[in-house]
Amino acid sequence: MIASVRGTVAALGPDGAVVEVGGVGLSVSCSPGTLARLRVGDAARLATSLVVREDSLTLYGFADDDERALFELLQTANGVGPKLAQTMLAVHPPRELRRAIATSDYATLVKVPGIGRKGAERIVVELRDRIGPIDQAGTAADVAGVTPVAPWKDQLLHALAGLGFTGKEAAEAVDAVSEDAPEVPDVAVLLRRSIQLLGRTT
């Protein structure tokens, strides 16, 4: 298993990054939140998880080891594959996901695209006793730095800046795609739409 990669960020895209390690460019699939922290040409360290399928090898990258550990745990629940696990972490930070699972907060879980009520109930039943300790302060709003809904507009702005767009271009694109966006959108989808929009206007 490839537990982490450290090297220079060679390229950024809507779904991931290329990190050059020892002269080899590794393609790493990342959530918008992780991509927002990366800049082309900068050194970076990503915790990673290699997902092996019959027809593919996909390396998923995360901001830290805790996020990777939760990504792997989520996939042990029936019906949760790597893409859905990554989407869960794109919508909610690890602490909020753990709290939602431990406290049977279905309303928070169903905000993730692809998870319905039955799916949320199944995830809670299968993972509640394995999720590990959570902050007992109460809701995520009581925990410094964590909010119930991910700041997706900020994620989009940072991700677009990392792709080389100016602040003005990024802000205009985010305003455009957010007009008909749901309350808790799929950030990766909006990032693709933003890039397509900017591609047409540049």
Image (spheres, rainbow, N blue to C red):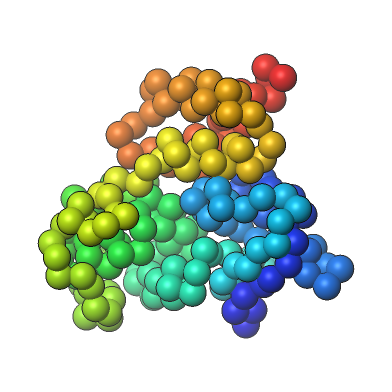
Left/right placement of residue 136 relative to residue 4 reads left
Please, is residue 49 above or below residue 195 in the view?
below
Please, is residue 188 above or below residue 8 in the view?
above
Please, is residue 1 above or below residue 125 in the view?
below
Residue 102 visible somewhere in the drawing: yes
Task: Determine the residue positioned at 25% across, 49% down.
Answer: 148
Q: Position of residue 12 (x, y in %)?
A: 69, 48
Residue 53 visible somewhere in the drawing: no
Out of 3 and 115, give the one closest to the viewer. 3
Left/right placement of residue 87 relative to residue 17 reads left
Q: Position of residue 160 (x, y in %)?
A: 59, 37
Q: Position of residue 169 (x, y in %)?
A: 60, 24
Question: Which corner quadrant of the image does residue 102 belong to?
Answer: bottom left
Task: Determine the residue positioned at 69% across, 25% down.
Answer: 199
Quadrant of the rendering where the N terminus is positioned: bottom right
Quadrant of the rendering where the C terminus is positioned: top right
Number of marks drawn = 0
Furthest-right residue in this view: 23
Left/right placement of residue 118 relative to residue 64 reads left
Out of 53 and 183, give the one closest to the viewer. 183
Task: Determine the residue positioned at 22% across, 65% down.
Answer: 99
Question: Which corner quadrant of the image does residue 184 belong to?
Answer: top left
Question: Which corner quadrant of the image does residue 104 belong to?
Answer: bottom left
Task: Determine the residue positioned at 58% across, 23% down.
Answer: 168
Q: Position of residue 142 (x, y in %)?
A: 18, 56
